[in-house]
């Protein structure tokens, strides 16, 4: 995992709570972007939040999937920061509605 778009010390705090220890942070389970070869993965949809520190990593991951031949879509939610669990926000409600429609759109093709 890499700290992007944020104060590194703050990102370290979050990373340490998400995945403690250097071995965990170097694991593909913690950061799928670390996978050597994503070509065998299933189709994916990557949702990012414009003000979220891992924005670049999420979009880079979607690009790597596509480069490996994995169907991948990416959508940047422009008015969100962090998680979508703040459903009181109109922007978060729109993001949740968008995400709920992704499987339907994929299966309708």
Image (cartoon, grey):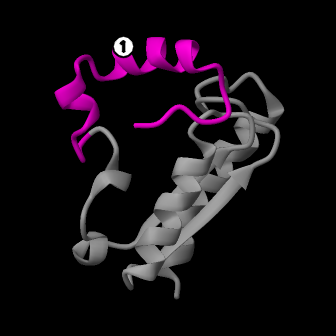
Q: Position of residue 77 (x, y in %)?
A: 73, 48
Quadrant in which residue 94 is drawn: top right
Residue at image position (28%, 77%) is: 39
Q: Position of residue 43 (x, y in %)?
A: 38, 73
Q: Is residue 11 above or below residue 104?
A: above
Quadrant in which residue 91 is drawn: top right
Q: Is residue 27 left or right of residue 91?
A: left
Q: Is residue 78 above or below residue 88?
A: below
Residue labelled with disc 1: 17
Is residue 51 rendered magenta in the image?
no
Q: Is residue 94 above or below residue 81?
A: below
Q: Position of residue 69 (x, y in %)?
A: 38, 85
Q: Position of residue 102 (x, y in %)?
A: 56, 64
Q: Is residue 5 left or right of residue 83?
A: right
Give the number of callouts: 1
The magenta-colored residue range is 1-29
């Amino acid at each position: 995992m890499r700290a992007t778009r944020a104060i590194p010390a703050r990102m370290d705090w979050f990373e340490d709570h998400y995945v403690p220890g250097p071995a965990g942070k170097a694991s593909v389970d913690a950061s799928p972007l670390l996978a050597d070869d994503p070509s065998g993965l299933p189709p994916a949809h990557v949702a990012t939040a414009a003000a979220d520190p891992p924005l670049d990593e999420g979009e880079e991951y979607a690009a790597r999937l596509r480069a490996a031949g994995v169907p991948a879509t990416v959508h940047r939610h422009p008015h969100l920061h962090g998680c979508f669990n703040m459903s009181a926000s109109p922007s978060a409600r729109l993001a949740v509605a968008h995400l709920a429609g992704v499987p339907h759109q994929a299966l309708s093709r």
